Amino acid sequence: MKKLNKAQITAKSVEISKCLINTSPGLVDYDLGVTRRIGDAARLAVAIRCHAEPINRQNLAGVSSSLKMDFRNVESDFIPMFEKLDWIEVKQDGNRIGTITEKIPPAADILSTLGTIWEDQQPTAIDKATIYSLAELSRRPYSKEALLSELNIKEEDFEATLDYGEMANYLGKLKSDEYELETIWTPLYWATNYDNVATFIKKQNEERLKVIGSLVDNFRKYPGMPIEKMGNQATLIGSGIYHGFFPSVAIGDRNNMSHQYLFSATPQFQTDSNSDIYEKARLIVSCVRHGQHHAEVSRILYPRSILNAMRNNCMKPHPYAVVQYAVLVLQGIVKLEPAETRYGKAYRVVWRDTPENNLAAEMADNLLQGEAPVTSKDELEAKEILVKGVYSYSSELRRLSATKEVKAKKEYDRLMELASGVKL
């Protein structure tokens, strides 16, 4: 089995930690404790990096909530870890955190450093098997016997690895009707092989595969498609979400309604495979789409212009910005500055100028290309993105979809079998 570098170990840990969000406590916290801890630490470090102003305890709690982490763990474990790494300086307020000044290194250094810690913390056999299984299966599916042989671990540890993977939906099993050989796969396979698979689908004559190909074209032309716009394709799409073929993210509004937005499984451009930038790009696009389709006041008509105005700090102060941009604030993409207007207190949206945010914005802009440009600055002032601050990762929604009956599973199992060239 190919050896992974430290950054790759952390990148896989991040994916697993997102899949384990809101899972019930149990042996998973022992068997996958090191991997989950490192993945969560990486997500937190990236979220608070490049904050120009000190972070107080309440801000930290807000970030923890946004990342769906237990604040007690953040305060008792990750903050001391970051302090020991000299990534932050903490000023105490009695027995509590007063403020935090961050000096966290670039994302590549975060991944490498935390990968070293993962190795030093004596990961369990299941920690190791999970990380390396995810890496191998991202390249191609394996028969169960071949994967067990590659991992070189006890069969009971291997079975536990598969059980956790199926529970959190980062691993799956499939068996052909024609062959008895059981095959193990990961939803992450599509992200690295999607272009080839999309080309493959167009050459097929099977009617259901043609329908999947049509959905692929739709989501490539219009990334962030609201799921309710897809009508009678809900069953096929729901199974595609479960299989990781169609990543979806969800944003909650102020009325406690959650809205899902659909994407194709891979960016149509290259980026650093060790980073989690594409999730952030999907977040930006989803916020814009939310404003287009579900805004409570006025709908966005020119998505790319909104993104451009946000990046260039051209958006006028607004009294509701503290609510409207909560998701982007908590994810470290923008910050809010108080401002006085003739209507009273308002907030100015300020872009956080970091390499990660700028790359995510470029990717988001590429996804939104094809929209008509704005011709008048006045039109920008009325367009709002109204979100509550609740964001569900694509990994998390894969797991949640697994709690429902997956009615179109065979189509994607068949697609995996044909496209990967694995004989089941």
Image (spheres, rainbow, N blue to C red):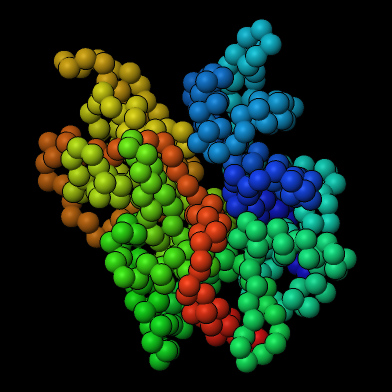
In this orientation, which residue lies closer to the viewer: 354 or 98? 98
Relative to 244, residue 339 above or below: above
How many numbered marks appear? 0
Q: Position of residue 300 (x, y in %)?
A: 21, 45
Q: Position of residue 81 (x, y in %)?
A: 72, 30
Considering every residue shown, the one lying at the far right of the view is: 154
Is residue 303 visible in the rendered structure shown here?
no
Identity of the residue drawn at 63% across and 77% down: 174
Identity of the residue drawn at 70% across and 58% down: 164
Q: Residue 262: name its quadrant.
A: bottom left
Identity of the residue drawn at 53% across and 33% down: 65
In this orientation, which residue lies closer to the viewer: 405 or 62? 405
Quadrant placement of the C terminus: bottom right
Is residue 188 visible in the rendered structure shown here?
yes
Position of 333 compared to 19: left or right? left
Considering every residue shown, the one lying at the far front of the view is: 405
Relative to 190, residue 98 above or below: above
Q: Position of residue 167 (x, y in %)?
A: 65, 58
Considering every residue shown, the one lying at the far top of the view is: 94
Q: Position of residue 71 (x, y in %)?
A: 61, 29
Position of 40 compared to 267: left or right? right
